[in-house]
Amino acid sequence: MGIFEYAPAPESRALANLKEQYKPFVNGEFVDGSGEPLKTVNPATEEILAEVGTASVSDVDTAVKAARKAYTSVWSKMPGAERAKYLFRIARLIQERSRELAVLETLDNGKPIKESRDSDVPTAAAHFFYHAGWADKLGYAGYGPDPKPLGVAGQVIPWNFPLLMLAWKIAPALATGNTVVLKPAETTPLTALVFAEICQQAELPPGVVNILPGAGDIGASIVEHPDVDKIAFTGSTEVGKLIQRTVAGTRKKLTLELGGKAANVVFDDAPLDQAVEGIVNGIFFNQGHVCCAGSRLLVQESVAEEVLEKLRYRVSTLRLGDPLDKNTDLGAINSAEQLAKIRGLVESGDAEGAQRWTSPCPVPDRGFFFAPTVFSEVHQSMRIAREEIFGPVLSVLTFRTPEEAVAKANNTPYGLSAGIWTEKGSRILWMANQLRAGVVWANTFNRFDPAAPFGGYQESGFGREGGRTGLEAYLNV
Ligand code: NAP
Ligand code: MG
């Protein structure tokens, strides 16, 4: 069967309301940061989008002081029902400005517009709606009749889901009565600064949310600041370990959401066409820049050839290119650095003897792109089976028995997520019990809901975000 030709369907770039300059947000106002301004780039074209003012260490101190003042004088004293109104307003404003946010996210991050429009932005709004609902019901959450907030939360987030990770961090913090100093990633600061405008629009009291663009050193100085009560970090395991060392022995409460190398396990009784869709979604969603990506496919030997054949065909139909085109499935890799990392790991797969298949799709010659790639004949000892590639690269291994599937799935230092594809409900439950992963999806993958807690085991980190369980990370319990 042939593949449809598509006419170009570009979303309008003008919707992003891109400004030439963006600034840090401290104590309810946009301020000149005293750090060296950074230039944020559109990874699909390599053009500079905007100049962004950054914070210095002294700005971190100013922001923490503002957050402390807002915490003591206003936010921690406000009844939950009043805090909830602000969260509802923010959620509604995210919806109102959703097209602007989606286009801006796509420009700054490189992800396809259909994902920023249909996944990132609506899920970000959903997190504020969900947590608005908790703000006046904390006494019924199972943490005692009147659980107290922690104080000032320092939050550091990565570039793969810039607005969504911000929502995962800020919504529960505010709902529980904490104030926030957040650092977005260096390569994707823009939607966080539009979120700051939304805080102004919602008339959030000054200092409750502070946003400090900057590099890793600003993240580190938030983590080190003595007047921060809680640290929430999403990013690499390497930086996570560093943060854990810094926080050790202090009163700071810590949650870490780190890397992953999830197994997506396909049994021979699975509906294979559906499984192929799940495999594709598992590893090619967001160019594979997903900590819970299904980057290791474990497929039962008896159906391995059939699955691989269907998979290669399906992957060859994915459309790679202009992230603003509504028909694009895979956009740009977020940075030249990340592209180099992916290339390096793919070369190691070649060198270690795995069999590489790459989609024959056209690849733009400007911008950072990587064609979807599937490695078969992968062994557990190979780097592509052990290390997080964080790109559109799938490693396929096989197994014969459910016990072998479990052993291989658990043979990783990580433990963030896993997928199971089978017709048998009993096998789903048995597997879910055996797999050491914070989230286990059955006959689906990459499903996110603010009501469902998300988090890891082992080197994937600790603490949960989302759901009733996620509130605990921001309460003094
Ligand atoms: P990263 O260095 O861990 O970055 C995450 C965030 O931490 C960014 O805001 C970063 O700032 C900041 N940061 C860097 N060094 C810090 C420090 N010493 N103290 C406090 N904050 C610090 O991750 P990355 O360099 O963007 O990506 C590297 C790898 O991490 C990826 O290839 C991927 O394997 C993994 N990763 C995982 C996730 C996830 O969701 N679990 C997300 C992103 C990356 P800058 O933006 O200035 O670097
Ligand atoms: Mg950028």
Image: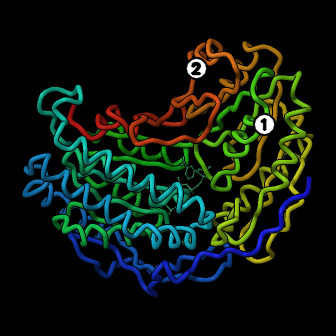
Q: In this view, does 257 lie to the left or right of 76?
A: right
Tell me where residue 293 sits by quadrant. Answer: top right
> What's the distance in space between the residues labelled 1 and 2, CA to CA?
22 Å
Relative image position of residue 98 (x, y in whole percent) = 43, 67
Relative image position of residue 36 (x, y in whole percent) = 44, 79
Kindly indicate whether the residue at mark 2 contacts the one at mark 1 (C-beta within 8 angstroms).
no
The residue pinned by badge 1 equals 273
Dot 1 falls on a residue whose secondary structure is: helix
Relative image position of residue 429 (x, y in whole percent) = 58, 15
Dot 2 falls on a residue whose secondary structure is: helix
Q: Residue at x 53, y 57 (%)?
A: 118
Q: Which residue is drawn at 73% across and 75% down?
A: 8
Instruction: Report the amino acid beneath label 2.
Output: Ala
Q: In this view, does 199 lie to the left or right of 296?
A: left
Relative image position of residue 58 (x, y in whole percent) = 28, 70
Crowd rating for badge 1 (residues with CA inside 10 Å; few <14, some 14–19, many 20+):
few
Q: Residue at x 39, y 49 (%)?
A: 168
The residue pinned by badge 2 equals 432
Residue 418: image tag: none
Q: Is residue 346 left or right of residue 434?
A: right
Instruction: Report the amino acid beneath label 1.
Output: Asp
